[in-house]
């Protein structure tokens, strides 16, 4: 079988191929592995960039020629893995398993300093054009969707489950089936379902919003009836289906019929949450599934306390428009009888309106099945592509059973009250990113000396019943001292500007919003910096921050950011100069965070 790995540019297809190859080798399993771009370079004696210089059509011809040569060499009943480039097109053949590899940053976009541009547009505009164009094609061709966690470099249990190389004994998950996204061939559909049962599925959900009677009958023929959860939300279609072992009934449809085992509540109406919970609790002899929209942390705590009053007969699945309760469902989902995961990104499908952004993917759910002692996280907005969960995972979770989660929190939500609520959920550590650092300092009950100096904090530790603030940015940014010069410009800064000013006392600081120097004595005439320190994130650029003057011709750009969509990287490409990301600074301050935590908790 050929396992063909497809996905967007920079999603990590080559790296994933190498991880799987290493696993097969260590386990003594037989398989052959191909990276299509590398095979093209071997055949032509030219790099992909050199081939693209002669035009994309020229490269695509070689791509097809080399792929067909590989395809002709395949031997039946042997395993093959091939990672293809983002623009690769193909006609699917029997015996192929097409894997769509994705990451969260697929949506936000990536900028590539070492890959040939495909258009004359700006890097992110180009990326998003192809993202919108290619995603529907990927979904149509794929036999399975593997969503991997950001910045996690090693092969994870979820990867092995997806590939059928591992099974888990526990059965905590429920996976909704979407007919249009499944194999049409009955034999292939059976293989698809059996593979996913080995993921640790308690049920497959069949929802009457999108399942026909013909599809339901087909599924019933392929898997045991006790593995099917029927969910009625839009109609009374399932009333006609006999022998429903597990049946969820939305109470908005009226009184529950005989045979319904689960009662669900999805819409709040105008009733306040406490009244809603009181009314919902009146239903007896059923498992109650609360899946309403939750608007803030206080409501989240209220509903969670309701669930904990009767955990055997209640499940709480909070929803939001932005997916802000993903972290809750990751770690507390395994405690519920009903714990939904998802495989597909439904953005480009006809099921888009039914997608629950708070539902975790397999890779986001599997790591948190085991019990935990406490919780840690990163507070930021936006937060999805930050590296703290991966960077701190080994120390906090693997060694000390403290999961590290990503919590989206807006500035106005960074309050003492919300920090108290989070401590009641079990959080004892937070890394804090922009734009929350100044408010984190104000909300803490005790501050370290460095935080007091800069009036900003990037670390919160809950110890002896109070939140304590620390600043480890200073540790990371001290590496910038060698750039302290009147020929250095710092563009932006936000909450870390006081730290940057201390590290770079001779540098010129500019407001990125106004594109003007903060030092009024600084002359703009004919000034061009040697080094430009970039300290503006993508979100702030979209909110009105400006690009530096065209007069600036820096010899190098040093970026405080490290994300793949950083405007600092885009600026460096625009002015054609050298670039260094802020990942080293991030790792240095993260190391200091661990040291502080270990010292307090005597680990």
Image: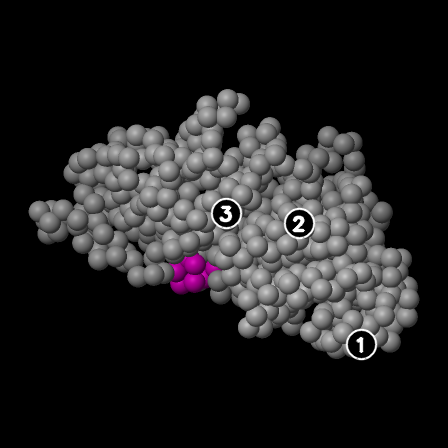
Residue depicted at x 80% and y 60%: 285
**Earlier-in-chain disc, 3 versus 1:** 1
Residue 521: give x, y in percent of width and height: 8, 47
Name the main secondary structure of what is drawn in magenta: helix
Q: Write down the region rendered in magenta.
A: 120-127
Q: Secondary structure at mark 2?
A: helix
Residue 25 location in percent, x, y? 73, 32
User: For this view, does 365 lie left or right of residue 187?
Assistant: left
Nearer-N-terminus badge (2/3): 2
x and y, in percent, of residue 235 in the image: 75, 77
Within 10 Å of disc 3 (Cα), the crowding (few <14, some 14-19, many 20+) is: some
Residue at screen point 39% across, 60% down: 122
State the CA–CA distance, disc 2 to disc 1: 33 Å
* Distance from Cα at disc 3 to Cα at disc 1: 42 Å
Q: Which residue is mark 3?
A: 421
Residue 148 in magenta? no
Q: Residue at x 55, y 40 (%)?
A: 426
Q: Is residue 124 magenta?
A: yes
Mark 1 element type:
helix
The secondary structure type at the circle numbered 3 is helix
Q: Are marks 3 and 1 in contact (CB under 8 Å)?
A: no
Q: Name the residue beneath numbered marker 2.
A: 308
Instruction: Count the marks.
Output: 3
The reply to whether residue 355 is in sight is no
Picture residue at 43% right of the left edge, 59% below the top: 124
* Nearest to N terminus: mark 2 or mark 1: 1
Q: Give the percent coordinates (x, y) of residue 84.
A: 63, 52
Q: Nearer the viewer, residue 283 or 212?
A: 283
Tell me the distance, in whole angstroms, between the alpha carbons under discs 2 and 3.
16 Å
Q: Which residue is mark 1?
A: 237
């Amino acid at each position: 079988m050929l396992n063909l790995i497809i996905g967007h540019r920079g999603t990590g297809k080559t790296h994933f191929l190498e991880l799987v190859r290493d696993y097969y080798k260590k386990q003594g399993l037989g398989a052959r592995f191909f990276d299509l771009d590398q095979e093209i370079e071997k055949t032509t004696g030219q790099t992909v960039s050199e081939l693209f210089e002669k035009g994309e059509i020229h490269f695509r011809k070689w791509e097809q020629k080399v792929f067909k040569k590989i395809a002709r060499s395949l031997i039946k009943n042997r395993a093959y893995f091939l990672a293809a480039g983002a623009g690769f097109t193909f006609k699917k053949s029997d015996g192929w398993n097409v894997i769509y590899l994705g990451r969260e940053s697929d949506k936000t976009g990536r900028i590539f300093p070492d890959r040939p541009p495909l258009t004359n547009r700006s890097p992110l505009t180009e990326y998003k054009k192809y993202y919108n164009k290619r995603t529907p094609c990927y979904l149509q061709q794929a036999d399975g969707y593997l969503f991997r966690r950001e910045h996690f470099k090693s092969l994870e249990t979820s990867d092995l489950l997806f590939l059928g190389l591992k099974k888990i004994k526990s059965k905590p998950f429920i996976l909704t089936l979407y007919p249009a996204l499944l194999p049409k061939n009955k034999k292939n559909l059976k293989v698809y379902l059996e593979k996913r049962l080995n993921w640790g599925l308690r049920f497959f959900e069949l929802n009457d919003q999108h399942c026909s009677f013909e599809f339901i009958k087909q599924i019933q023929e392929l898997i045991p009836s006790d593995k099917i959860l029927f969910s009625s939300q839009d109609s009374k279609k399932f009333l006609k289906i006999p022998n429903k072992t597990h049946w969820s009934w939305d109470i908005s449809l009226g009184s529950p019929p005989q045979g319904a085992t689960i009662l669900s509540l999805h819409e709040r109406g105008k009733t306040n949450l406490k009244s809603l919970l009181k009314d919902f609790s009146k239903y007896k002899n059923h498992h109650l599934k609360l899946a309403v929209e939750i608007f803030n942390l206080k409501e989240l705590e209220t509903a969670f306390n309701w669930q904990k009053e009767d955990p055997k007969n209640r499940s709480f699945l909070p929803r939001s428009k932005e997916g802000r309760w993903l972290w809750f469902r990751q770690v507390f989902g395994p405690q519920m009888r009903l714990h939904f995961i998802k495989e597909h990104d439904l953005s480009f499908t006809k099921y888009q309106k039914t997608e629950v952004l708070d539902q975790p993917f397999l890779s986001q759910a599997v790591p948190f099945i085991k019990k935990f002692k406490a919780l840690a996280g990163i507070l930021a907005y936006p937060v999805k592509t930050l590296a703290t969960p991966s960077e701190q995972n080994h120390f906090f979770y693997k060694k000390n059973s403290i999961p590290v989660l990503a919590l989206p929190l807006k500035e106005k939500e960074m309050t003492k009250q919300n920090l108290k609520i989070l401590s009641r959920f079990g959080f004892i550590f937070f890394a804090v990113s922009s734009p929350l650092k100044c408010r984190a300092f104000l909300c803490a009950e005790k501050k370290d000396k460095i935080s007091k100096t800069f009036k900003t904090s990037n670390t919160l530790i809950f110890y002896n019943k109070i939140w304590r603030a620390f600043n480890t940015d200073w540790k990371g940014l001290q590496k910038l001292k060698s750039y302290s010069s009147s020929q250095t410009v710092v563009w932006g800064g936000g909450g870390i500007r006081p730290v940057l000013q201390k590290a770079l006392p001779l540098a010129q600081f500019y407001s990125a919003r106004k594109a003007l120097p903060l030092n009024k004595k600084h002359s703009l005439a004919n000034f061009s910096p040697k080094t430009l320190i970039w300290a503006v994130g993508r979100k702030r650029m979209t909110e009105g921050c400006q690009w530096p003057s065209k007069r600036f011709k820096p010899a190098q750009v040093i970026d405080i950011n490290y994300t793949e969509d950083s405007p600092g990287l885009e600026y460096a490409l625009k002015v054609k100069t050298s670039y260094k990301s802020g990942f080293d600074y991030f790792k240095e301050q993260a190391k200091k965070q661990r040291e502080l935590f270990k010292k307090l908790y005597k680990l």
